[in-house]
Image (cartoon, coloured by chain):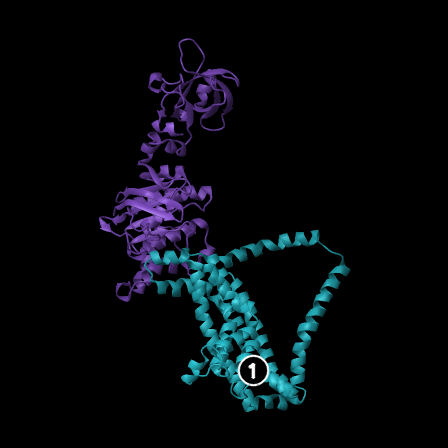
Amino acid sequence: MAAGFISQLSTTEPAAGAASIRATRDPAWLRYTLLGAALLFLGLFLVVPLAAVFTEALRRGVGAYFAAFADADALAAIKLTFLAAAIAVPSNLVFGVAAAWAIAKFQFPGKSVLITLIDLPFAVSPVISGLVYVLLFGAQGWFGPWLQAHDLKIIFAVPGIVLATIFVTFPFVARELIPLMQAQGTDEELAALTLGASGWQTFWRVTLPNIKWGLLYGVILCNARAMGEFGAVSVVSGHIRGETNTIPLHVEILYNEYNFVAAFAVASLLALLALVTLGLKSLVEWRARQPVRT
Amino acid sequence: MSIEVQNIRKTFGPFTALDNVSLRVPSGRLTALLGPSGSGKTTLLRIMAGLEFADPGSGRIQFHGADVTNTPAGQRGVGFVFQHYALFRHMTVADNIAFGLNVRPRRERPSPAEIRTRVERLLALVQLEGLAHRLPTQLSGGQRQRVALARALAVEPKVLLLDEPFGALDAKVRKELRRWLRRLHEEVHLTTVFVTHDQEEALEIADEVVIMNQARVEQVGTPQAVYDHPATPFVYEFLGNVNRLQLPSRGFAQAEAFDVNGGRFAYVRPHDIELLPVQDGFDGELAQLRTVHTAGSVARVTCTRHHAADEIIEAEVSRQRLTELGLQIGDSVLLRMRRGRVFAEDFAI
């Protein structure tokens, strides 16, 4: 219904838009100055750094560029990053949908507290959230002695990285879905129930199809952040080469060792990921806005 | 299938939506739950459907003698139609209608071919042949509401419940659709309850009208009965126009029946007031003519009472009668009440 509504609005837009342009027409110099300033700013702060990453990475030629990925530590970092994302994104997908479902479709005491809690990872500096995990699971932490007694390692090991990633990326899916599900209301679910559908059937056949584009959007953002997260992961990782380094951490190490080509080559991977994310994001936004297929 | 509601109470926090409501909906009839917003009519309908549950410890809901008080909505065999249709926005019309059949367990589910046939039949019933592959966004409001109705009927409910089914439609479509619903009811003869705040709608199509106000049932009866014999001042004022006449008044034929205890009110419909010239031999309430509206099938006039000039009385007379009287604005006239009613409860007001 929302998609149809938007498409209806956009058909009436040109006329209104044309009239308003005439009414609010600014002098040419002002328009071009503003446009120029915006483009300059964008270029300086977004395009130039992106170009610099690729230029630096390819400074010694394509051979040196790919050599950076042949390194065992680089490969291990890439693998770990994908592993962390592969665990964090599905977990947050499930948590996010569950939280959004509960918040949007039910009334219960403590709801506003839950909404605030979901935003916590956005409000807290990632470094602090990393420190919290060290405080909880580190050798001197609350659960430290117990973990040591059972020979479990969380901090300075893969589980810590996964935990930190999950924490930092928790809000993306839920935040995306809550307003969407609230706007859609519960009538369709109630209709499904009166028609004899079970809770699961209602979720799979009615709720999920209605939120699929918002969900995909949240997952894309969540994934980008999960792969790019630096602060929280840095605190819990311990920077053990080949074991607990993710791509961003590996870039930092290479850079600190003056291995610029390799650093930028690995960084270009994250830059590419960002570009792919943006591409997917626009595609999803465009697809979600389409009047539903005939 | 009859519906029996016994002593149902429902509160939302400090707000009482239903206050010990009891009601019997007869089998196979079209019943309207009529009342102003906040009167509890929608809550009552949702409790019948199993979308809400009455307060713990309050009464019971029975479908044809079987207790369904704690039965979930999906197992009550009700078809529910929502005010804003609640069609599944990502499904075609055909998939919407087939939903209730498709979610059945495999052994109870009809074959795909049979589901298709049923959908076709239902589309024909709601006069939407050819729109099976449209999406809800590509339909008009009236069409959407008919799809919602077909979807509810697809599961062969024993009871059909409609929540303000025409509330979101414009006046013309509303009128067409409610007559169509009446014809449909005559075809399928399903026990049907619909909620409305539009008294014209309720009086026009329902077999029985249940008038609700402030969490209680005020009156139950046929449209004719509730219109002609309102049980309470609320019903009088809610159904059609009515004058509230301070007593005593000379306008009543059996004046002594009303002429007791000053401060009471008589309720008189505008069309039950007769206009007479001020002449010897006629008796009635002396009033002055204030306004006359003749744009319509009858002339509507307003008068003020001679003895209580702040009291405005509306009357409806035929336009011919008005011409015969030859009245001008400001002229004196005698009012005779053919029928009226006094409520003892008015002491409380």
Q: Position of residue B232 (x, y in %)?
A: 35, 32
Q: Decide: is A34 above or below A147.
A: above
Q: Position of residue B57 (x, y in %)?
A: 29, 50
Q: Decide: is B349 above or below B159.
A: above
Q: Is residue B203 left or right of residue A82?
A: left
Q: Report the front residue among A205 and A199.
A: A199
Q: Residue at x 73, y 66 (%)?
A: A36
Q: Is residue A146 visible?
A: yes
Q: Position of residue B162 (x, y in %)?
A: 36, 48
Q: Which chain is purple?
A: B
Q: Is residue A56 left or right of residue B42?
A: right
* Amino acid at the residue labelled 1: Ile
Q: Decide: is A227 above or below B73.
A: below
Q: Residue at x 63, y 52 (%)?
A: A16
Question: For chain A, what colour was chosen?
Answer: cyan
Q: Which residue is mark 1?
A: A247
